[in-house]
Image: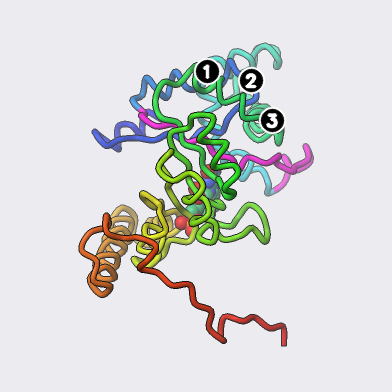
Protein backbone atom coordinates (compact mmCIF):
# COMPACT_ATOMS: atom_id res chain seq x y z
CA UNK A 1 0.00 0.00 0.00
CA UNK A 2 2.82 2.35 0.88
CA UNK A 3 4.43 1.78 -2.53
CA UNK A 4 1.20 2.82 -4.24
CA UNK A 5 0.89 5.88 -2.01
CA UNK A 6 4.46 6.93 -2.86
CA UNK A 7 3.97 6.34 -6.58
CA UNK A 8 0.71 8.24 -6.82
CA UNK A 9 1.99 11.40 -5.14
CA UNK A 10 -0.61 14.04 -4.37
CA UNK A 11 -3.32 12.47 -6.52
CA UNK A 12 -6.60 11.49 -4.89
CA UNK A 13 -6.61 7.80 -4.03
CA UNK A 14 -9.55 5.42 -3.83
CA UNK A 15 -9.29 2.09 -2.06
CA UNK A 16 -11.13 -1.03 -3.22
CA UNK A 17 -12.10 -3.20 -0.28
CA UNK A 18 -12.51 -6.94 -0.34
CA UNK A 19 -14.76 -6.84 2.68
CA UNK A 20 -13.62 -9.40 5.30
CA UNK A 21 -16.15 -11.29 7.37
CA UNK A 22 -14.33 -10.44 10.56
CA UNK A 23 -15.23 -6.89 11.63
CA UNK A 24 -12.03 -6.49 13.62
CA UNK A 25 -9.92 -7.20 10.53
CA UNK A 26 -12.12 -4.85 8.47
CA UNK A 27 -11.71 -2.08 11.03
CA UNK A 28 -7.96 -2.57 11.10
CA UNK A 29 -7.63 -2.46 7.30
CA UNK A 30 -9.74 0.69 7.17
CA UNK A 31 -7.51 2.34 9.80
CA UNK A 32 -4.45 1.60 7.66
CA UNK A 33 -6.16 2.81 4.49
CA UNK A 34 -7.21 6.04 6.15
CA UNK A 35 -3.79 6.66 7.63
CA UNK A 36 -2.31 6.15 4.15
CA UNK A 37 -4.44 9.05 2.89
CA UNK A 38 -7.01 7.21 0.78
CA UNK A 39 -10.11 9.35 0.42
CA UNK A 40 -12.83 7.12 -1.03
CA UNK A 41 -13.77 3.58 -0.10
CA UNK A 42 -14.94 1.43 -3.03
CA UNK A 43 -16.69 -1.72 -1.86
CA UNK A 44 -16.69 -4.33 -4.57
CA UNK A 45 -19.79 -6.51 -4.70
CA UNK A 46 -18.22 -9.22 -6.87
CA UNK A 47 -16.78 -11.37 -4.13
CA UNK A 48 -18.48 -14.69 -4.65
CA UNK A 49 -17.13 -17.75 -2.88
CA UNK A 50 -13.88 -18.93 -4.42
CA UNK A 51 -14.27 -22.52 -5.59
CA UNK A 52 -11.09 -24.38 -4.73
CA UNK A 53 -9.94 -27.47 -2.85
CA UNK A 54 -6.93 -27.90 -0.61
CA UNK A 55 -5.47 -30.14 -3.33
CA UNK A 56 -5.39 -27.09 -5.60
CA UNK A 57 -2.66 -25.69 -3.40
CA UNK A 58 -0.28 -28.24 -4.96
CA UNK A 59 -1.19 -27.33 -8.52
CA UNK A 60 -0.95 -24.46 -10.93
CA UNK A 61 -3.88 -22.92 -9.12
CA UNK A 62 -1.50 -21.71 -6.45
CA UNK A 63 -0.20 -18.57 -8.18
CA UNK A 64 -3.81 -17.53 -8.62
CA UNK A 65 -4.57 -18.09 -4.96
CA UNK A 66 -1.55 -16.11 -3.91
CA UNK A 67 -2.43 -13.20 -6.14
CA UNK A 68 -5.79 -12.30 -4.65
CA UNK A 69 -4.94 -9.20 -2.69
CA UNK A 70 -3.12 -11.27 -0.11
CA UNK A 71 -0.77 -8.43 0.72
CA UNK A 72 -3.66 -6.45 2.14
CA UNK A 73 -4.47 -9.24 4.57
CA UNK A 74 -0.93 -10.46 5.21
CA UNK A 75 0.31 -6.99 6.13
CA UNK A 76 -2.58 -6.20 8.45
CA UNK A 77 -1.63 -6.39 12.16
CA UNK A 78 -4.98 -7.79 13.31
CA UNK A 79 -5.00 -10.42 10.55
CA UNK A 80 -1.43 -11.39 11.51
CA UNK A 81 -2.30 -11.65 15.17
CA UNK A 82 -5.36 -13.80 14.50
CA UNK A 83 -3.38 -15.97 12.10
CA UNK A 84 -0.68 -16.49 14.72
CA UNK A 85 -3.32 -17.52 17.25
CA UNK A 86 -4.80 -20.15 14.95
CA UNK A 87 -1.51 -21.44 13.53
CA UNK A 88 0.54 -21.87 16.67
CA UNK A 89 2.51 -18.66 16.33
CA UNK A 90 3.34 -18.79 12.62
CA UNK A 91 3.51 -15.80 10.31
CA UNK A 92 1.85 -15.66 6.85
CA UNK A 93 5.34 -15.60 5.31
CA UNK A 94 6.22 -18.94 6.90
CA UNK A 95 3.15 -20.79 5.61
CA UNK A 96 1.73 -18.53 2.88
CA UNK A 97 -0.64 -21.13 1.40
CA UNK A 98 -2.36 -21.67 4.72
CA UNK A 99 -2.50 -17.93 5.33
CA UNK A 100 -3.95 -17.46 1.82
CA UNK A 101 -6.72 -19.92 2.68
CA UNK A 102 -7.54 -17.91 5.79
CA UNK A 103 -7.54 -14.63 3.84
CA UNK A 104 -9.65 -16.09 1.02
CA UNK A 105 -12.13 -17.39 3.58
CA UNK A 106 -12.43 -13.87 4.97
CA UNK A 107 -12.55 -11.82 1.79
CA UNK A 108 -14.18 -14.29 -0.64
CA UNK A 109 -16.37 -16.27 1.72
CA UNK A 110 -19.48 -16.08 -0.43
CA UNK A 111 -21.48 -15.17 2.67
CA UNK A 112 -24.28 -12.68 2.04
CA UNK A 113 -24.04 -9.33 3.74
CA UNK A 114 -27.31 -7.52 4.27
CA UNK A 115 -27.70 -3.79 3.73
CA UNK A 116 -27.66 -3.06 7.47
CA UNK A 117 -24.10 -4.37 7.57
CA UNK A 118 -22.98 -1.16 5.84
CA UNK A 119 -23.11 0.31 9.36
CA UNK A 120 -19.84 -1.53 10.08
CA UNK A 121 -18.13 0.42 7.33
CA UNK A 122 -19.74 3.70 8.36
CA UNK A 123 -18.49 3.17 11.89
CA UNK A 124 -14.89 2.80 10.76
CA UNK A 125 -14.81 5.02 7.66
CA UNK A 126 -15.90 8.64 7.68
CA UNK A 127 -15.21 9.37 4.00
CA UNK A 128 -17.33 8.64 0.93
CA UNK A 129 -18.43 5.04 0.33
CA UNK A 130 -19.02 3.79 -3.22
CA UNK A 131 -20.61 0.43 -4.07
CA UNK A 132 -19.17 -1.17 -7.19
CA UNK A 133 -21.26 -3.66 -9.14
CA UNK A 134 -24.82 -2.30 -9.02
CA UNK A 135 -26.78 -3.67 -11.97
CA UNK A 136 -30.40 -3.27 -10.88
CA UNK A 137 -32.46 -0.14 -10.22
CA UNK A 138 -33.89 -1.71 -7.06
CA UNK A 139 -30.41 -2.12 -5.62
CA UNK A 140 -29.53 1.43 -6.63
CA UNK A 141 -32.55 2.67 -4.66
CA UNK A 142 -31.52 0.59 -1.64
CA UNK A 143 -28.00 1.96 -1.90
CA UNK A 144 -29.40 5.49 -1.73
CA UNK A 145 -31.65 4.57 1.19
CA UNK A 146 -28.62 3.28 3.04
CA UNK A 147 -26.77 6.50 2.44
CA UNK A 148 -23.96 5.46 0.10
CA UNK A 149 -22.27 8.34 -1.62
CA UNK A 150 -21.89 6.72 -5.00
CA UNK A 151 -22.53 3.60 -7.04
CA UNK A 152 -20.64 2.12 -9.95
CA UNK A 153 -22.96 0.56 -12.50
CA UNK A 154 -20.76 -2.36 -13.50
CA UNK A 155 -20.87 -6.03 -14.34
CA UNK A 156 -17.16 -6.19 -13.47
CA UNK A 157 -16.23 -6.31 -17.11
CA UNK A 158 -18.58 -9.23 -17.78
CA UNK A 159 -16.19 -11.65 -16.10
CA UNK A 160 -18.22 -12.67 -13.10
CA UNK A 161 -21.54 -14.05 -14.29
CA UNK A 162 -22.11 -15.64 -17.65
CA UNK A 163 -25.02 -14.01 -19.42
CA UNK A 164 -25.09 -10.94 -17.18
CA UNK A 165 -26.84 -8.06 -18.86
CA UNK A 166 -24.55 -5.36 -20.25
CA UNK A 167 -24.08 -2.48 -17.83
CA UNK A 168 -24.94 0.09 -20.47
CA UNK A 169 -28.32 -1.59 -20.93
CA UNK A 170 -29.08 -1.02 -17.25
CA UNK A 171 -27.64 2.47 -16.89
CA UNK A 172 -30.72 4.48 -18.05
CA UNK A 173 -33.08 2.64 -15.67
CA UNK A 174 -30.70 3.08 -12.78
CA UNK A 175 -30.21 6.78 -13.48
CA UNK A 176 -33.97 7.17 -13.71
CA UNK A 177 -34.42 5.39 -10.37
CA UNK A 178 -31.88 7.36 -8.34
CA UNK A 179 -31.37 10.55 -10.34
CA UNK A 180 -29.02 12.86 -8.50
CA UNK A 181 -29.55 11.27 -5.10
CA UNK A 182 -26.18 9.58 -5.38
CA UNK A 183 -23.23 9.84 -7.75
CA UNK A 184 -23.65 7.32 -10.56
CA UNK A 185 -20.42 6.11 -12.15
CA UNK A 186 -20.08 3.53 -14.90
CA UNK A 187 -17.71 0.86 -16.14
CA UNK A 188 -17.50 -2.35 -18.18
CA UNK A 189 -16.70 -2.17 -21.85
CA UNK A 190 -15.40 1.38 -22.26
CA UNK A 191 -13.08 1.12 -25.27
CA UNK A 192 -13.64 4.31 -27.31
CA UNK A 193 -14.59 7.94 -26.95
CA UNK A 194 -18.03 7.08 -28.32
CA UNK A 195 -18.48 4.62 -25.45
CA UNK A 196 -17.70 7.36 -22.94
CA UNK A 197 -19.99 9.75 -24.82
CA UNK A 198 -22.90 7.30 -24.56
CA UNK A 199 -22.40 6.49 -20.88
CA UNK A 200 -22.21 10.16 -19.93
CA UNK A 201 -25.23 10.98 -22.11
CA UNK A 202 -27.16 8.21 -20.36
CA UNK A 203 -26.48 9.87 -17.03
CA UNK A 204 -23.18 8.57 -15.64
CA UNK A 205 -21.14 11.30 -13.96
CA UNK A 206 -17.89 9.61 -14.98
CA UNK A 207 -16.61 6.36 -16.42
CA UNK A 208 -13.90 3.98 -15.26
CA UNK A 209 -11.62 2.00 -17.53
CA UNK A 210 -10.18 -1.42 -16.77
CA UNK A 211 -8.59 -3.70 -19.32
CA UNK A 212 -7.51 -1.13 -21.93
CA UNK A 213 -5.12 0.33 -19.36
CA UNK A 214 -3.78 -3.14 -18.59
CA UNK A 215 -3.27 -3.80 -22.30
CA UNK A 216 -1.38 -0.48 -22.61
CA UNK A 217 0.67 -1.41 -19.56
CA UNK A 218 1.49 -4.81 -21.03
CA UNK A 219 2.57 -3.37 -24.35
CA UNK A 220 4.49 -0.29 -23.30
CA UNK A 221 4.44 0.19 -19.52
CA UNK A 222 3.68 3.65 -18.18
CA UNK A 223 3.90 5.16 -21.67
CA UNK A 224 1.32 2.65 -22.86
CA UNK A 225 -1.13 3.54 -20.09
CA UNK A 226 -0.71 7.23 -20.83
CA UNK A 227 -1.23 6.57 -24.53
CA UNK A 228 -4.47 4.64 -23.92
CA UNK A 229 -5.84 7.46 -21.76
CA UNK A 230 -4.75 10.13 -24.23
CA UNK A 231 -6.40 8.24 -27.11
CA UNK A 232 -9.64 7.84 -25.15
CA UNK A 233 -9.74 11.54 -24.33
CA UNK A 234 -8.89 12.55 -27.89
CA UNK A 235 -11.54 10.19 -29.21
CA UNK A 236 -14.13 11.61 -26.81
CA UNK A 237 -13.19 15.11 -27.89
CA UNK A 238 -13.54 14.13 -31.56
CA UNK A 239 -16.86 12.37 -30.97
CA UNK A 240 -18.24 15.42 -29.17
CA UNK A 241 -17.10 17.70 -31.97
CA UNK A 242 -18.73 15.50 -34.61
CA UNK A 243 -21.96 15.43 -32.59
CA UNK A 244 -21.87 19.19 -32.09
CA UNK A 245 -21.57 18.97 -28.30
CA UNK A 246 -19.29 21.53 -26.70
CA UNK A 247 -19.15 20.32 -23.13
CA UNK A 248 -19.69 17.01 -21.33
CA UNK A 249 -22.23 18.92 -19.26
CA UNK A 250 -24.36 19.22 -22.41
CA UNK A 251 -24.56 15.47 -22.95
CA UNK A 252 -28.02 14.07 -22.32
CA UNK A 253 -30.23 11.17 -23.35
CA UNK A 254 -32.00 13.17 -26.08
CA UNK A 255 -28.77 13.09 -28.11
CA UNK A 256 -28.93 9.29 -28.43
CA UNK A 257 -31.17 6.90 -30.32
CA UNK A 258 -31.45 3.21 -29.68
CA UNK A 259 -31.53 1.58 -33.09
CA UNK A 260 -31.68 -2.09 -34.08
CA UNK A 261 -30.14 -2.98 -37.41
CA UNK A 262 -30.64 -6.21 -39.32
CA UNK A 263 -27.05 -7.13 -38.64
CA UNK A 264 -27.69 -6.98 -34.88
CA UNK A 265 -30.03 -9.95 -35.09
CA UNK A 266 -28.12 -13.04 -34.07
CA UNK A 267 -28.66 -16.41 -35.68
CA UNK A 268 -27.27 -19.84 -35.02
CA UNK A 269 -27.29 -20.76 -38.73
C1 LIG B 1 -8.62 -9.80 -14.56
C2 LIG B 1 -9.61 -8.90 -13.90
C3 LIG B 1 -9.63 -8.82 -12.51
C4 LIG B 1 -10.56 -8.01 -11.87
N1 LIG B 1 -10.58 -7.95 -10.49
C5 LIG B 1 -11.48 -7.15 -9.88
C6 LIG B 1 -11.52 -7.04 -8.48
O1 LIG B 1 -10.75 -7.66 -7.77
N2 LIG B 1 -12.44 -6.22 -7.92
C7 LIG B 1 -13.31 -5.50 -8.69
O2 LIG B 1 -14.11 -4.74 -8.14
N3 LIG B 1 -13.29 -5.58 -10.01
C8 LIG B 1 -12.40 -6.38 -10.62
N4 LIG B 1 -12.38 -6.44 -11.98
C9 LIG B 1 -13.33 -5.64 -12.75
C10 LIG B 1 -12.72 -4.28 -13.01
O3 LIG B 1 -12.51 -3.57 -11.82
C11 LIG B 1 -13.63 -3.43 -13.88
O4 LIG B 1 -14.93 -3.35 -13.30
C12 LIG B 1 -13.78 -3.99 -15.28
O5 LIG B 1 -12.56 -4.52 -15.75
C13 LIG B 1 -14.23 -2.84 -16.15
O6 LIG B 1 -14.46 -3.29 -17.43
P1 LIG B 1 -13.40 -3.08 -18.62
O7 LIG B 1 -12.22 -3.91 -18.30
O8 LIG B 1 -14.19 -3.55 -19.80
O9 LIG B 1 -13.08 -1.59 -18.67
C14 LIG B 1 -11.46 -7.23 -12.64
C15 LIG B 1 -11.41 -7.29 -14.05
C16 LIG B 1 -10.50 -8.12 -14.67
C17 LIG B 1 -10.48 -8.15 -16.19
Q: Which residue is mark 1?
A: 27
Numbered badge on residue 22: 2
Would you name the residue on which mark 3 appears? Answer: 105
| Of the image marks 1 and 2, the number of the one nearer the N terminus | 2
Check residue 60 for magenta coloring.
no
Residue 129, horizontal then vertical, whole percent:
45, 31
In percent of width and height, residue 259 lies at 49, 77
Question: Is 58 a magenta residue?
Answer: yes
207 lies above or below 95: below
Q: CA distance from mark 1 to mark 2?
A: 9 Å
In depth, the one of 90 and 185 nearer the eye is: 185
Residue 263 quadrant? bottom right
Characterize the local packing of mark 2: few (<14), some (14-19) or many (20 or more) Cα atoms within 10 angstroms: few
Residue at 37% from the left image edge and 57% from the top image edge: 200
As helix, strand or loop, the secondary structure at mark 2 comes to loop
Classify residue 45 as left or right of residue 61.
Answer: left
Residue 31 as seen in the image, left or right of residue 18:
left
The 10 Å Cα crowd at callout 1, few under 14, some 14 to 19, many 20 or more, is some
Q: Nearer the viewer, residue 200 or 229?
A: 200
Helix, strand or loop at label 1? It is helix
Q: Are marks 1 and 2 in contact (CB under 8 Å)?
A: no
Mark 1 vs mark 3, foreground winner is 1
Callout 3 secondary element: helix
Query: In the figure, 163 relative to 84: above or below?
Result: below
* Image location (x, y in percent) of residue 162: 68, 59
Which comes sooner in the sequence, label 1 or label 3?
1
| Magenta residues (range) | 38-59
Q: Classify the position of the C terminus by image quarter.
A: bottom right
Amino acid sequence: MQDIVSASGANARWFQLYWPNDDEITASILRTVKAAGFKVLVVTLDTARMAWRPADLDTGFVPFVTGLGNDVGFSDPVFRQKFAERSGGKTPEEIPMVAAQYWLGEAFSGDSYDWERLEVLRKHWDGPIVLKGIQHPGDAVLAVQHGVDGIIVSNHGGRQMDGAVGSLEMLPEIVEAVGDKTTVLFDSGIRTGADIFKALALGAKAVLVGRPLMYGLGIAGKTGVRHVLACLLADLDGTMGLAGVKSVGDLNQAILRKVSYGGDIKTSI
